[in-house]
Amino acid sequence: MAFQSRISILTLSMFAIFASLYVAGRLWHDAENRVYLAKELDRITGQGKSVISVDDSWKIIECREQLKKLSALEMELSTARQEGFVSKHLPEMNKIPKKNPLVVIGILTGFGRKNERDAIRKAWMGAGAALKKMEDHKGIVVRFVIGRSSNQGDSLDRSIDSENKQTNDFFILENHVEAPEELPKKTKLFFAHAAENWNADYYAKLNDDVYVNIDALGNTLAAHLDQPRVYIGCMKSGEVFSESGEKWYEPDWWKFGDGKTYFRHASGEMFVISKALAKFVSINRYILRAYAHDDVSVGSWFIGANVKHINDRKFCCSSWSSGAICSGV
């Protein structure tokens, strides 16, 4: 029994010695690893004996990845330059960005109205170099707005295409069928598409029998640039005609109450809306209601919105007076 007891004690002692050696070895190994990692972090970050957090370590890794991507892009750009691709586009990139237009004017016209268009070109709109100069120096873009014939591609369409080839001053609504009863829809499409094609401060709608004082218009609009949602024109509220067959018959007359009077809206001869409102029309074009007349339709779109209505008598085109902006003929 004494012999067995000595063996047991010896076994336990040996186990304890081996365990101590194992633990000491692991601690020594971990200490070496910590020293090595600390030195590596110091070497990478260049911060001497300072300690960085795990988050900072991830940021270093992310920066390395971004540098790799940047290096790859630089190599692709160098290859593209050697192939002559970039050089074709650099002149465009190096150009001074064009200033956004102050206003885009859409003159709603129709088939068989060439004489009226020619009169406007001679009177105030200009053509060719004069039209381009007005765009570049005054920031005023003017286009005749027209749709397509119900028999698309017929002589009516061809005549407009031929005229536009000579003058280059049309804004053709390819998906709109030209018809008198579709004028409210045409006005809506003009604002929607104009807002998508020009990043102007304002958008104006005109009839093709209206003459405009361009300088007076520019000065008036410039005075309202600090107001983001404005609807400017000669405001009125006329009678709603409920009898079918009358010239100004309104099929939805019952919506305007027993008084049969329209809400305040700008006269359709000429009115202006700001960029925010044009974009509003563009976004909501499919749900905005069109009434029988385009001026009433436009007024209805803004009646429930946070819009500033500006009643400017200079936009009353029926009478030409000193300082007036427009005149109807």
Image (cartoon, helix red, strand yellow):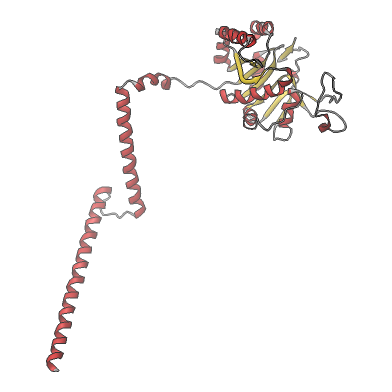
Q: Going 54% across and 15% down the picture, which residue do you hit?
A: 136
Residue 113 placement: quadrant: top right
**Horizontal and vertical percent for residue 77?**
33, 28
**Horizontal and vertical percent for residue 208?**
70, 12
In the displayed structure, does residue 98 sit left or right of residue 1?
right
Residue 19 placement: quadrant: bottom left
Residue 312 placement: quadrant: top right
In the rendered view of the protein, which quadrant contains the C terminus?
top right
Q: Is residue 223 visible?
A: no
The answer to whether residue 221 is above or below residue 43 is above
Q: Going 85% across and 33% down the picture, which residue do you hit?
A: 257
In the displayed structure, does residue 154 sit left or right of residue 251?
left
Taking depth in this image into account, of 162 and 203 the one nearest to the observer is 162
In the displayed structure, does residue 267 sit left or right of residue 63?
right
Taking depth in this image into account, of 16 and 7 the one nearest to the observer is 7
Taking depth in this image into account, of 301 and 41 the one nearest to the observer is 301
Residue lying furthest bottom in this view? 1
Q: Going 17% across and 72% down the picture, which residue do you hit?
A: 21
**Horizontal and vertical percent for residue 267?**
76, 21
Residue lying furthest left in this view? 3
The answer to whether residue 125 is above or below residue 253 is above
Count of numbered labels shown in the rendering: 0
Q: Is residue 168 visible?
A: yes
**Horizontal and vertical percent for residue 224?**
65, 26
In the rendered view of the protein, which quadrant contains the N terminus?
bottom left
